Image (tube, rainbow, N blue to C red):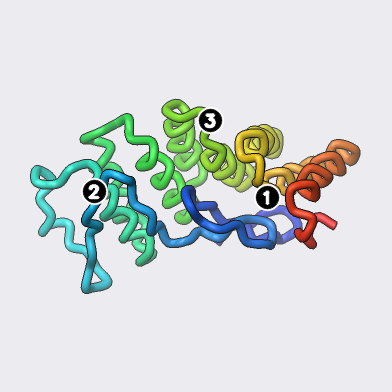
Amino acid sequence: MFTGIYSMNIMFKSAILFPVYAVVFCVLSPAIAYAQDNTSPVSFTTAQIDFDDVNPVEKSYQEWFNIGLDLSTLGQYEEEIASYDKALALNPSFHDAWFYRGIALGNLGEYEVAIASFDQAIALEPDNGDTWFNRGLALENIDDYEGAINSYERAGLLNENDDDAWYNRGVLLGALGQYEAEIASYDKAIAINPQNADVW
């Protein structure tokens, strides 16, 4: 899947309501928290979804988004992206569709396109720390360590309980030989989560 310095397991972090796991990054969890205005999430009885059977005229942007979330749980990332694209065609200002589109693109290894999607999400919600964190992951995967460090820092400042952001930032600072800044970043991670063994 993802590769990173020190052979770390790099995976994208889903946004809302997902727990933070140990190890360097958060595992992409199935998206099960639908937007608040959705009262009837789409359910599927087969492992495949036939888009020919879904009439886009009859679906709202929220319904297309929910279909994308279900596709993500099935690992059908290309179809997931297509569903988010349909949602965005109806509502280009829908932050969550841009965000999860970026995650799906990251899962396909399309990091530069994922960054562009995260940038769209940030333009809509600049104070969303999860988007900055995932942008950092994508930048790290194309070896843009300076850009990733800046994104992780922004994520850490916005999400005060996100020790992963400060840890990831520290790892990259160390890789660039900025050891004092690396230690300071680790100290921030420890202050948030003293139980994170990786930091020690």
Residue 110 showing in the rendered view = yes
Disc 2 designates what residue?
A: 64
Q: Earlier in the sequence, mark 3 or mark 2?
A: 2
Give the quarter of the figure containing the C terminus.
bottom right
Q: Is residue 47 left or right of 6 when viewed as pictured?
A: left
Query: As shown in the figure, which amino acid type bears the numbered disc 1?
Result: Asp
Disc 1 designates what residue?
A: 164
For the residues marked 3 and 2, what is the alpha-carbon distance in whole angstroms?
25 Å
Give the quarter of the figure containing the N terminus.
bottom right
Query: As shown in the figure, which amino acid type bears the numbered disc 2?
Result: Trp
Of the two numbered discs 3 and 2 in the rendering, the one whose residue sits closer to the viewer: 3
- Closer to the camera in the image, 117 or 155: 155
Quarter of the view holding residue 84: top left
Q: Residue furthest bottom?
A: 46
Disc 3 designates what residue?
A: 127
Give coordinates of residue 182: x percent, y percent: 84, 42
